[in-house]
Image (cartoon, rainbow, N blue to C red):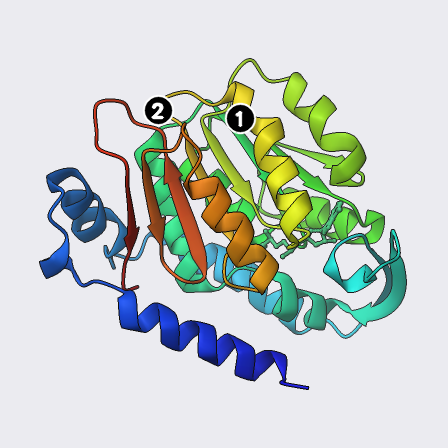
Amino acid sequence: MISRKLRTAVRYFKYSLSARSKFKVHSPFVFKFYTGLILDKNPQAAFSRIEKQRSLLLRQRSLLETTDFGTGAGQNEYKTRFRQVRSITRGSSISPKFGALIYRLVKYTEPDEILEVGTAMGISTLYIAAAAPKSNIVTIEGCAVIAEKARENFNHMGIGNIELVMGNFNHLLAKTVSDFDKLDFVLIDGNHRKKPTLDYFSQILPKLHPGSMVVIDDIHWSKGMEEAWDEIRKHESVTVSIDLFRTGILLFKENIAKENFVLRF
Ligand SMILES: C[S@@+](CC[C@H](N)C(=O)[O-])C[C@H]1O[C@@H](n2cnc3c(N)ncnc32)[C@H](O)[C@@H]1O
């Protein structure tokens, strides 16, 4: 059987063959978005505070009895296992590079209402909150002990605008979404399987508007995720889609030609 690493390497190779540099981006809007925002490398003061918090977690060897409702559960609804805090943090959290990207994307969107599907230790939520300290942020996590750890992190960082909702996305997302009048920024980063990802997109769709941005993480994680990404980016509501390999960005702007961009990052 081909290993996951090898399959990822093959997917990355295919992506890199089609990934464009800025010189091949002809849309003026996307050129500016890519060069001025996606490729921006300026560090922000908040980044080092978040990374310090990540480092604290990466030193913790304490064991948590975790419940996995996502891909780790296989064919079952969930699977429990003991994992160290540091290995959950290492295995689940967004990297500093992508955290900084999320920060810039949130800043750009100037959102009032933010939804994150998949909290884990809350590292990505911290990047979101740093960019949007006055917004309403709701983040969902299925594993109770991981959610508790994320809450501790938010308290430790003194952040008060995050509501953590605990439960299985499959049962809870529709109700959570219905509590929003609109969704300005959504990060989908959990249960990386085709059907659930398509379902989550359908559930948030009615609350999106031309100024919304949706970011889907791990779009090349598996064949199923690649199929889900392809289907979502082709949806009539999506105008600009940007594939950065690890992450996909969806924009719903009006008066712009529908186009998919595979860009180097
Ligand atoms: C990749 S991690 C999120 C990482 C986080 N966004 C970050 O970058 O810091 C995905 C999280 O989603 C949770 N999850 C996966 N499937 C779920 C489901 N069906 N319901 C609820 N939570 C789920 C997992 O427990 C895991 O903590």
**Quick check: marks 2 and 1 in contact, CB under 8 Å?**
no
Q: Secondary structure at mark 2?
A: loop
Q: Is residue 185 left or right of residue 243?
A: right
The amino acid beneath tag 2 is Gly
Quadrant hosting residue 13: bottom left
Q: Is residue 166 visible?
A: no
Q: Position of residue 31 (x, y in %)?
A: 15, 47
Q: Position of residue 256 (x, y in %)?
A: 21, 29
Q: Residues within 10 Å of mark 2 (few under 14, many from 20)?
A: some
| Quadrant in which residue 20 is drawn | bottom left
Task: Report the residue marked by disc 1.
Answer: 205
Q: Which residue is at 82% across, 60% downward?
A: 73
Task: Determine the residue positioned at 27% across, 35% down.
Answer: 258
**Residue highlighted by disc 2:** 211
Q: Do we see residue 196 in this rendering? A: yes
Q: Quadrant of the C terminus?
A: bottom left
In this view, the residue in front, 22 or 86, is: 22
Q: Is residue 158 above or below residue 228?
A: above
Q: Amino acid at mark 1?
A: Leu
Q: x, y (%) of residue 144? A: 83, 47
Give me the residue at 18% from left, 48% from top: 36
Residue 134 x %, y %:
46, 26
Asked whether mark 2 lies closer than 8 Å to ligand 1, one says no
